[in-house]
Amino acid sequence: MVGRRGLLGGMAGLGMAGLAQGAAAQAAWPDRPLRWIVGYPPGGASDAFARLIAAQMGPRLGQNVVVENRPGGGAVLASEVVARSPADGYTWMHVDNGILTYNPALYARLPYDPDRDFTGVGFIGRFPLFIVVRPNDPVQDFAGLVAASRSKAPTYGTPAVASPHHLAMELVKRRTGLAAEHVPYRGGPAAMQDLLAGNVDVVVIDTATGTPFIRDGRVRALCVMSEARSALFPNVPTLRDLGHDAVAYGWQGMSVPAGTPGPVVARLAEEMVRAMTSPDIARRLADLGIEYQPWTPAQFTAFVAQENATWRPLIRDLGIRLDS
């Protein structure tokens, strides 16, 4: 018969062995290919940045990083896949405003809880949003747009219902007195083409899609919604410059399932910052006017919490739902 002391000693030995095995497993991580889940089709900004960053991180980690596109339902399908994946650092989630901040207010029921099921790893960037019109539009500035809207509300296009662009414009309407009617499109390029064709009066567009149009003079930017003026277009005023407290961005980052070991998260965060500050990606960000900060996981988490406090109440107040 094993005595109490012997039993406790055996349990302690098992515990130490388990810890040693866990440490060995983390030390060996990663020992197989990793996957980065993107909840949108190939070819968009999320897909493009996931592939750029993965190409930088894979060699440093010693494994291939496979980008998997799982489009559908506001990235809910992709989010559920990652939320239910093992918390071992082998499955990454490309996250944004919609996935982490908007969806809990847009859907009565979600198969995942972004506040509980994900751990933030790193930041990809904030995408400034511009309000643009055709070059020959009689409206010369944002004040003129607000004044004209009092007699006839213009139509404004965005890439989708409940996109950062749509919600940003609704915030602008509340804080500036602008009247405007929303026209959702299937992506930013479609909205821009309809603007040029004269089928919509105004478009809210992000810097990644809008920069070539603004730079080439195909559209005229009335304002930008960021905190400071764009380095690419310093003559375009912010709404704060014009006396309106309305700041909004599109943004992207990367998360992993909650419970992923701290050393693994720390390694991913370190490699992600290294990738984001590499000459190739840093140049791409600068060319598109995307704002990057080398945030730690804790800083990224704090940023998301701040976004939640701003946008979830607004969405509920507006009554926008995607599952009704």
Image: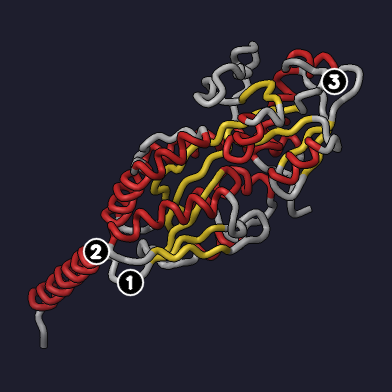
- Image spot of residue 109 (x, y percent): 66, 56
Residue holding disc 1 = 32
Quadrant of residue 128 in the image? top right
**Mark 2 to mark 1 CA distance (whole Å):** 13 Å
- Image spot of residue 19 (x, y percent): 19, 66
Judging from the image, what secondary structure is the residue with disc 1 in? Answer: loop
Quadrant of residue 143 in the image? top right
**Mark 1 to mark 3 CA distance (whole Å):** 57 Å
Position of 59 with respect to 135 (left or right) is left
Farthest residue in the bottom direction?
1
Q: Counting residues from the N terminus, which is met first, the one under dot 1 or under dot 3?
A: 1
Judging from the image, what secondary structure is the residue with disc 3 in? Answer: helix
Residue 63, placed above or below residue 96: below
Nearer to us: label 2 or label 1: 1
Residue 5, placed above or below residue 186: below
Please say if the residues under marks 1 and 3 sit with CB atoms less than 8 Å apart: no
Q: Counting residues from the N terminus, which is met first, the one under dot 2 or under dot 3?
A: 2
Residue 189, placed above or below residue 292: below
Viewer can see residue 309: no
Judging from the image, what secondary structure is the residue with disc 2 in? Answer: helix
Q: Look at 57% across and 39% down and name the residue there.
A: 208
Q: Using a 10 Å C-alpha cutoff, classify the residue at mark 1 as few (fewer than 14 neighbours), some (14 to 19) or many (20 or more).
A: few
Disc 3 marks a residue whose amino acid type is Ser
Q: Using a 10 Å C-alpha cutoff, classify the residue at mark 2 as few (fewer than 14 neighbours), some (14 to 19) or many (20 or more).
A: some
Q: Residue 190, which numbered label?
A: none
Please say if the residues under marks 2 and 1 sit with CB atoms less than 8 Å apart: no
